[in-house]
Amino acid sequence: MSYALIADVLSIILILAGSILTLAAAIGVARFSDTMARVHAISKPQTTGLIFTILGALIKVTGSEDFSVAERGDLGILILLVLFAMITSPVTAQRTSRIARREGLYGPAESMSRNEHPATRSMRRK
């Protein structure tokens, strides 16, 4: 077995796993009814799916027989994509959740638990 064959098989597995996770995130956004569930569905599996897909592409690029100096710039861009996704996705999810909680953008009141109800009074000291 050559390294190119192992890299091809491993990259296919990672890309398929990433595609399935990203598909699950898209289905979760379409299926869930309230904002918090949608934020959770889009932030966790979408980021993990993106990381798996980019790792699969990274392994595919390094495993090719004609890997040269020109492709090393592509590796840097792929690594930067992973870093930016890992930095921005949690921050975006936290900000969206905070705005949704502050504005009361939840589902119907009868489906909420006690902890999910928006605050009725301001939490700031006067």
Image (cartoon, helix red, strand yellow):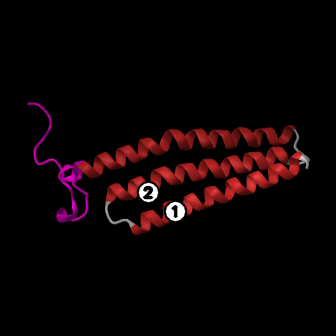
Q: Is residue 58 left or right of residue 28?
A: right
> Residue at (48%, 66%) from the top-left corner?
27
CA separation in Å, label 1 and label 2: 8 Å
* Within-10-Å neighbours for mark 2: few <14, some 14–19, many 20+: many
> Residue at (68%, 43%) from the top-left corner?
78
Q: Secondary structure at mark 1?
A: helix
Residue under circle 2? 41
Residue under circle 1? 24
Residue 101 falls within the magenta-colored stretch: no
> Residue at (84%, 46%) from the top-left corner?
63
Q: Of the residues shown, which amino acid type is indicated by label 2?
A: Ala
- Residue 45 place in picture, x, y as percent: 51, 53
Where 96 falls versus 73 (above or below)?
below
> Residue at (74%, 52%) from the top-left corner?
11
Question: Residue most toward the bottom?
Answer: 31
Q: Is residue 83 left or right of residue 71?
A: left
* Range of magenta residues: 102-126
- Residue 87 place in picture, x, y as percent: 51, 38
Q: Is residue 37 left or right of residue 10?
A: left
Q: Nearer the viewer, residue 68 or 3?
A: 3
Mark 1 / mark 2, whichever is N-terminal: 1
